[in-house]
Amino acid sequence: MKDNIFLDSNIFLYGFSDIDLKKHEIAKDVLLADDFTISTQVINEVSNNMLKKLGFNELNIMDFVDSCYKRYSIINFSKDIFFSASAIRVKYRYSYWDSMVIASALESNCNILFSEDLHSGQEIEKRLEIVNPFK
């Protein structure tokens, strides 16, 4: 079975920043593939950090957004995602935004979520494994 992978924003941010060279190289390797799913939340988080922390300009943001829509499957929030995220917050004790990422990955039928910020190795709802690609 082919893995369906959802990317969290930190994968992109390490790909854009070479402050941590090891993570930068890993992120660049991950991002070479085109068959990922991300949410509009991920696009927003990356865009905001590109502007505020990495010194990118609006043209860079527009190029990033355009590239995402050309290369990846993009999921928008729905009522089901909001309700699922609420249940995830209660059951797994994740933050609001982390729960939205997890719920989006589940809604997209992904079985792997690449993230540095969540509990690597944890299985959510017996359907989604969180994997830290930097470990």
Image: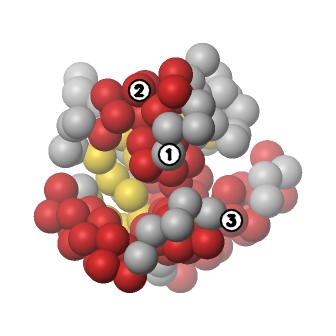
Q: Quadrant of the image for the C terminus?
A: top right
Of the residues under marks 3 and 1, which one precedes in the sequence? 1
Instruction: Measuring from the top left, give residue 16's x and y in whole percent.
Output: 43, 49
Residue 25 bears which disc, if any?
2
Q: Is residue 66 left or right of residue 82?
A: left
Taking the spot 63% from the left edge, 23% from the top edge, the residue there is: 121
Q: Is residue 9 above or below residue 86?
A: above
Instruction: Determine crowd level at label 2: few under 14, some 14-19, many 20+ residues with C-alpha closer than 10 A.
Output: some
Q: Quadrant of residue 56?
A: bottom left
Kind of residue sitting beneath label 2 = Glu
Instruction: Determine crowd level at label 3: few under 14, some 14-19, many 20+ residues with C-alpha closer than 10 A.
Output: few
Spatial CA span between label 2 and label 3: 26 Å
Kind of residue sitting beneath label 3 = Trp
Which numbered disc, 3 or 1, marks the residue closer to the eye? 1
Q: Are marks 1 and 2 in contact (CB under 8 Å)?
A: no
Judge by depth and name the residue closer to the eye, 101 or 88.
Answer: 101
Residue 100 in view here: no
Residue 69 bears which disc, if any?
none
* Residue labelled with disc 1: 17
Instruction: Measuring from the top left, give residue 36's x and y in whole percent.
Output: 29, 46
For the residue labelled by badge 1, is the local secondary structure a helix, a strand or a loop?
loop
For the residue labelled by badge 3, is the local secondary structure a helix, a strand or a loop?
helix
* Residue labelled with disc 3: 97
Q: Quadrant of residue 28?
A: top left
Spatial CA span between label 1 and label 2: 10 Å
Judge by depth and name the residue closer to the eye, 127 or 118.
Answer: 118
Q: Is residue 120 above or below residue 115?
A: above
Taking the spot 18% from the left edge, 56% from the top edge, the residue there is: 71
